[in-house]
Amino acid sequence: MTIEAWNILLSSVILVLTTAGGLWLKYVVDQQSKSKDTAIQALEGVVKFKDAHIALRVTLPLQ
């Protein structure tokens, strides 16, 4: 093979690997974003529960 042919072949391989790596990275970032959103929703639920608990204790007479 000539140097030009090797150059084209290696450039093609680099292009394919870069594209595959970019797609994989996008997949990983999307999964992390979904996990983050789930964690935020869970923590919002805890905050609402604590707020309700505090409101209930405020309305009850002290013993």
Image (tube, rainbow, N blue to C red):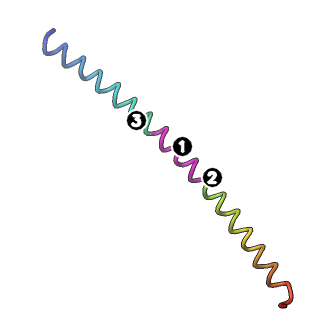
Q: Which residue is mark 2?
A: 38
* 42 relative position to 26: left or right: right
Position above or below: 25 against 41: above
Disc 3 crowd, CA 10 A, few/some/many (<14, 14-19, 20+): few
Circle 2/circle 1 CB separation < 8 Å: no
Q: Which residue is mark 1?
A: 31
Q: Which label lies toward us, 1 or 3?
A: 1
Task: Say which quadrant the N terminus sits in.
Answer: top left
- Which one is nearer the viewer's eye here, 38 or 12? 38
Look at label 1 and name its amino acid.
Answer: Gln
Residue at the spot x=52%, y=47% of the render?
A: 32
Q: Secondary structure at mark 1?
A: helix
Disc 2 crowd, CA 10 A, few/some/many (<14, 14-19, 20+): few
Position above or below: 11 against 27: above
- Magenta region, residue range: 26-38
Q: Give how far across and how far down residue 33 sits, in percent.
A: 54, 49
Q: Which residue is mark 3?
A: 22
Residue 35: in magenta span: yes
Q: Give how far across and how far down residue 2 sits, in percent.
A: 13, 11
As measured in the structure, the alpha-carbon distance from the residue carrying label 2 to the one carrying label 3 is 24 Å
